[in-house]
Amino acid sequence: MSTPVAAGTLSASSPAASRAWARWRRRRVAALAESTPATIGIAIVLAWAVLALVAPLIAPYPPNANDMAALAHPTPSKAHWLGTDHLGRDLLSRILWGARPVLVIAPLAVLGAAALGSLLGLAAGYYGRWIDLVITRACDIVLSFPVIILYMIILAHFGSSAWNIVGVLTLTKAPIIARIVRGMTLDLREREYVAAAKMRGESALYIMLVEILPNARGPLVVDMCLRTGYNVIIIGALGFLGIGLPPPDPDWGGMVKDTYGMMMVWPHMALFPCAAISSLVVGFNLLAVGLRELGLRD
């Protein structure tokens, strides 16, 4: 995380500040490239992103195509490299197509939670008093519910869709981010550059978004990477519980659910979707570790 003096300098609109900001970004990118966990994490996440992007081109079969000849022998073969599921659908194709909604829903929900949580945390930490009390108690109420039960209640009422999953993940993760931002805001609001902004007559919104939030971005970005990995797990769990993406669209968690009763006979049907979920979660976690190491060096 950058120092207060540097943050105040970078917030000024001048050519010198722009050059300093460019040098700072180059140092950050170079330091990130030197981190082994970050490099591995970025490679895993980018690999899945590329596979998801080109899935229509490289998937050997349509995701919902049935091969009746493979029903008797669903194990991996030349025709189906990862085998087929209980309906004769190619597992490799469904895994590739299933990566697309995961890599859209999980980051989108984190961005929504970060935006909402940051606004709530900034307001609670900066203003204090009754605003802090109301926001903190509202966050406590949301966090007091068991999350899985809350997911089931909301999705059972509004229905399972990509947008509803994004909404429920945003709602349940925003209070956690709000508490993180609130704690940092309580400390940062006492810094000299915030006092200088007040003396210049800057508005409270300007101070929160321009002076305070950029100095809280380090821990916030690390938390967002970790939370994206958590969201991948949650999306898989929702699919396994039958309240994830509606069938027949490929859903990694739903693929495990559909073949749950056949694990002892055909373990590959659940093993490969679970491996996909695990690898993507590991990628985001390693990226978060690398970002945290980068922050500790500053």
Image (cartoon, grey):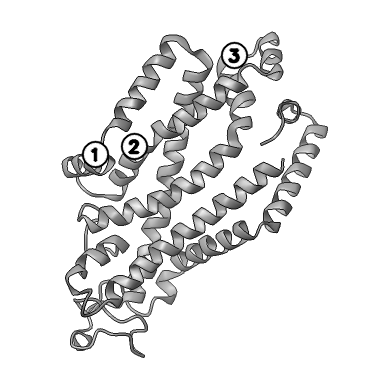
Rendered view: 82 above or below 159? below
Amino acid type at image mark 1: Leu
Residue contact at pointers 1 and 2, CB within 8 angstroms: yes
Q: Residue at x 34, y 42 (%)?
A: 169
Residue contact at pointers 3 and 2, CB within 8 angstroms: no
Q: Residue at x 26, y 49 (%)?
A: 161
Query: Where residue 106 sits: x, y (%)?
Result: 40, 50
What residue is shown with label 3?
203
Horizontally, residue 51 falls left or right of residue 95, namely right
Q: Which numbered disc flags the more N-terminal residue, 3 or 2?
A: 2
Rendered view: 42 above or below 164? below
Task: Judge whether residue 107 can be spotted in this image.
Answer: no
Amino acid type at image mark 2: Thr
Residue contact at pointers 1 and 3, CB within 8 angstroms: no
Viewer-nearest of labels 1 and 3?
1
Query: Where residue 114 sits: x, y (%)?
Result: 47, 36
Q: Which mark is residue 172?
A: 2
Query: Where residue 284 sits: x, y (%)?
Result: 50, 54
Cα separation, mark 3 vs mark 2, equals 30 Å
Cα separation, mark 1 vs mark 2, equals 9 Å
Rendered view: 174 above or below 67? above
Q: Secondary structure at mark 2?
A: helix
Q: Which mark is residue 267?
A: none
Q: Which numbered disc flags the more N-terminal residue, 1 or 3?
A: 1
What residue is shown with label 1?
150
Q: Residues within 10 Å of mark 1 (few under 14, many from 20)?
A: some
